[in-house]
Amino acid sequence: MPISLAPILLAIELGFMFVLTWRTSRLAPAEGIIKPVYVYLLWVTAYGILASILGARGVYISKDILKLLPGFWLQLIPVAVCVFPVVLFDSVRHGMRRIADNTPWHWFAYFHGLRIAALGTAYKTMIGEFPASFETVVGIPDLLFGISAFWMAGKIKRGEISTKGFMIWNLVGLLVIVPSAPIMLQLGLPGPFQVFTSLPDARAVLTYPMSIASMIGVPLFVMINLWVAWRLWERGRTSEHGTER
């Protein structure tokens, strides 16, 4: 198996979320509010294990999947796994609010510093093991965002970032991946929409162990960007209207 940071990175991401949940349960204990978040995180972890197994078995690059234009929909699966429970269950939503409110902003910034792991795909591109088209449009912006995380953490610790500024930065973290990643993925996969035909093509993105990053690791970064931005926006509305739902 090729050497990859993807499994380690996924473990760190999930571990970070479990630590934040545990920390909140200690700092701001509230009966029954945090437990649903643990269940939610176990659900996401179970999906991560399943996605890893499917990637190892080559499911994502099988002919049956490739003919269905997976670039346009495949990565919606981890988004649905992460978002639907939060939308559907008040208990999960309340717990996620509490965790966001009790986590220092610079922790979130340093967390996104892990995105400098995109250096790995930059190196693979240089040695001809990763598609240059995907790296140029998706990988390099993601790497730059990871670098910016350390600058952002410093600004936060010095009290130089406003709520709006941090919310916008998180939205930028989302937009460096969406919608460019799914579009570039499909444009590099065999099929009627393939534009980038040089080898290696975008199948490298869905080949194990890189598939761990594309099917759960990177979507988790994006979902945490969205979560923090959502909570900051929600708190802004609360301060304006004096209510919170």
Image (cartoon, grey):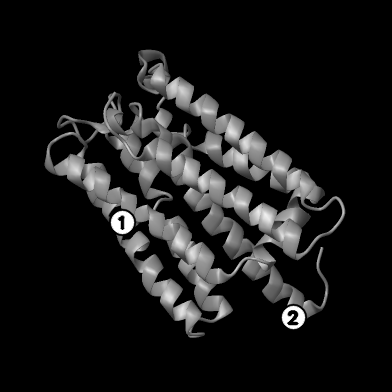
Q: Which of labels 1 and 2 is toward the front?
A: 1
Q: Is residue 120 above or below residue 166?
A: above
Upstream in the sequence, badge 1 or badge 2?
1
Neighbours of disc 2 within 10 Å: few (<14), some (14-19), many (20+): few
| Dot 2: element | helix
Identify residue for label 2: 240
Picture coordinates of residue 71 (x, y %)?
40, 33
Picture coordinates of residue 47 (x, y %)?
57, 31
Picture coordinates of residue 144 (x, y %)?
30, 61
* Residue 194 or residue 122, whichever sits in front: 122
Res. 143 mark: 1
Picture coordinates of residue 96 (x, y %)?
70, 55
**Is residue 176 in view?**
no
| Dot 1: element | helix
* Residue 103 or residue 81, whichever sits in front: 103
Tell me which corner region of the image, top left, top right, bottom left or bottom right, holds residue 210.
top left
Residue shown at 54%/34% (left/top)?
A: 77
Q: Residue furthest toward the right? A: 31
Q: Is residue 125 above or below residue 70?
A: below
